[in-house]
Image (spheres, grey):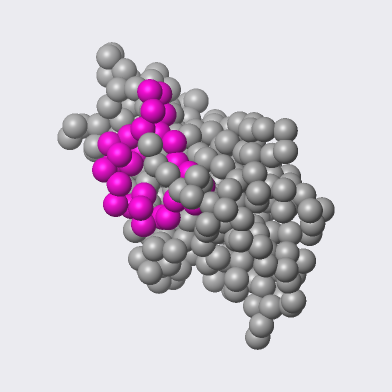
Amino acid sequence: MKPAAFVYRAPASLPEALAQLREFGGDARVIAGGQTLVPAMSMRLARPAALIDLNGVAELAFLRAGADAIEIGAMTRQRTLERSAEIGRHARLFHLALPHVAHFQIRNRGTFGGSLCHNDPAAELPAVAAALSAEFVIAGASGDRTVGADGFFAGLLSTALEPDEILRAIRIPYLPGSCGFGFAEVARRHGDFALAGAAAVLRLGGDGTLDLARLVLFGVDDGPVRAHAAEAAMLGERPSDDLWSAAAAAAVAGISPVADLHASALYRREVAETLARRVLRQAAAELRDG
């Protein structure tokens, strides 16, 4: 199989790439790592009139620690994040999740921004970005705008990006104090998309109760699911197995998993609840050991 005919452009700067997107009036696609778009084009599931290749836009590939957040360029390779000491210090949840993302050969080519913009429901990186309350810096004709994770992931394979916009960078705010992290997923084979997964962030206050709790499920809905009700129920409570069980049950109460050839909706729900308990225990163990 081969893709339908298309115009190929290779801009050298972000303004040039944005101008080329506007030139084709919404009928162009940007290509980053190409790990998803190229197969889709080959099967003619995607038939853009033009392909705007961002690999020559050097300003989109960076990783820098600022005063209050670590900022990651959208074209930064996943393998760069996996190996980064800065990510390990400031956003270690990515280090727990990235080994589950496909295989290292794919991570060598795949980009951070590409995975987030594709927003596959079973993808790990959108879930981690949601758990870390990432901020998405979006470039357009009128300048940059910033969208939070709750507003960026808009539905199945959909985001807040407009057709003439490009994700420029992702900001991961620093978490104050010492946090514990947890990540787990179930897949048919290592490297496959997750049938269900969960990510957690916990922090203890001075009185020994939780003053920060974040829990995200993935593979069970149209995108990452931030379990706000479960998080609220954990705040002010002392860590315990009973608390993790109650939080996990609350987290899956509002989800509607889909059934497919690989798993039933009931299976996904039960796995998600089990994984939610597991990642909360994992995060709490890090707090205890730290």
Residue 78 image-quadrant placement: bottom left
Give yes or no for residue 16 being in the magenta stretch.
no
The quarter of the rendered structure image containing the N terminus is: bottom right
Q: Position of residue 149 (x, y in %)?
A: 57, 37
Q: Which portion, as a residue range, is magenta?
A: 65-92
Q: Residue furthest bottom?
A: 1
Question: Which residue is nearer to you in this view: 36 or 168?
Answer: 168
Is 216 displayed left or right of 162 in the figure? left
On-image quarter of the C terminus: top left
**Which residue ends up furthest to the left in the rendered image?**
289
Residue for point 39% across, 63% down: 108
Q: At 42% from the left edge and 44% from the top edge, which residue is drawn?
A: 62
Q: Which residue is at the far right?
A: 25
Q: Which residue is nearer to you in this view: 148 or 196?
A: 148
> In the rendered image, is residue 248 in sight?
no
| Residue 208 on image: x %, y % | 27, 19
Say left or right for 27 vs 209: right
